[in-house]
Image (spheres, rainbow, N blue to C red):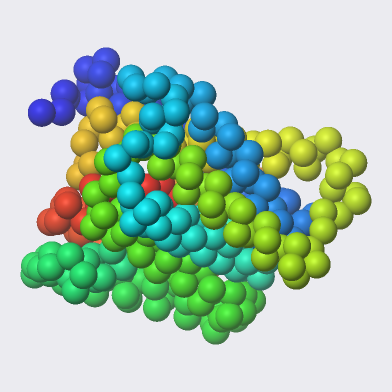
Amino acid sequence: MDKPPHSPAGTTYYLTLVAACLLMASGYIAGKVLLAAHIPAFLLIGWRFSLAAVSCLPLVLAADSSFVRTLVPPHFTWRDWAVVTLIGLSQTTATMGLIFQAMQTISAGTAAILLSTNPLWVALIGHFVLSERLSGLRLVGLFCGICGVALALGASGTGLLHEPMSGQLTGLASAVCWAIATILIKRAKLAINAWALSFWQMLIGAAMLLMLAYARGEHWPASALTSIGLWGWFIWLAVPCSTGSFGLWFLALRRGGATQTSGYLFLVPLLTVLMSALMLGTGLSLMQALGGILIGIALWLVSRTKPQALAIMLPPP
């Protein structure tokens, strides 16, 4: 049973949760700054997660078993490694590649709202793939989520925002890819350390992104290579926003449980919008704000009525 919020353990839990959400939100800001410096999306994400994967290794060392056995479980079959590869391709290559591709034309706040719809797609896909029935409240939650997404996407046609529909649909596709990765993890039930899985899925996903980037002729702009400020943003994106947010998120999951903790992911788009307004000078239309509120209500309903669907949901890397 969770300790009351006023207890030291409860305070630590909420501080950890807020810190994790702040790091996740700051990742959108850092990404937007780097993309504005004309760093290609696939190249940026590929090198980001290459560094993030390496930064996971000290945490793998902290596991109870030996480093090699933790990183390469002796009981793993070729099928298990194939599943890990699929998770890496869907979680890192597709999800993060698409969302950063989308952020070349849409705001950080819009991207955060769209990616936060992931639990709704998990619930919908899980109904067919995992035989998890959609209860009445979950159906209400999904309906609220669909309306919220429609409002968020429809905002570009109001004249209040000038964001192309193609970029918004790309952002929405990234959320569906994240949901597919979540379903894969849940269905496969891989017996592997969480940090080892994070290492492999980030490394595999990053390798594919780098291959795609160099095949497309992408290169790091010379102006970005010589900018200390941009390197600072890149290090922040690669380590605190990736490995750091993962670490704090898993700590919050252990303290507060999956059901309670996962419901707080709707804070990420809110924090992203606030940080984006303060640091990038961007705004939010009334329709997007209403859409974000509906998505938040939907996430709350889904997480309250079917915790299993969110139990293994990873934070945005």
The residue located at (15%, 28%) in the rendering is 2
Number of on-image labels: 0
The quarter of the displayed image where residue 66 is located:
top left
The quarter of the displayed image where residue 299 is located:
bottom left
Q: Which of 251 and 91 is in front in this view?
A: 91
Q: Which of 190 and 168 is in front in this view?
A: 190
The residue lying furthest to the bottom in this view is 157
Q: Nearer the viewer, residue 202 or 100?
A: 202
* Image location of residue 206, percent across then percent down: 59, 52
Q: Is 3 on the left or on the right of 89, as rendered?
A: left
Q: Is 168 on the left or on the right of 129, as rendered?
A: right
Quarter that holds the N terminus: top left
Residue 117, compared with residue 204, is above or below; it is below
* Image location of residue 118, percent across then percent down: 36, 62
Q: Can residue 101 be seen in this view?
A: yes
Q: Is residue 289 visible?
A: no
* Image location of residue 18, percent across then percent down: 40, 35
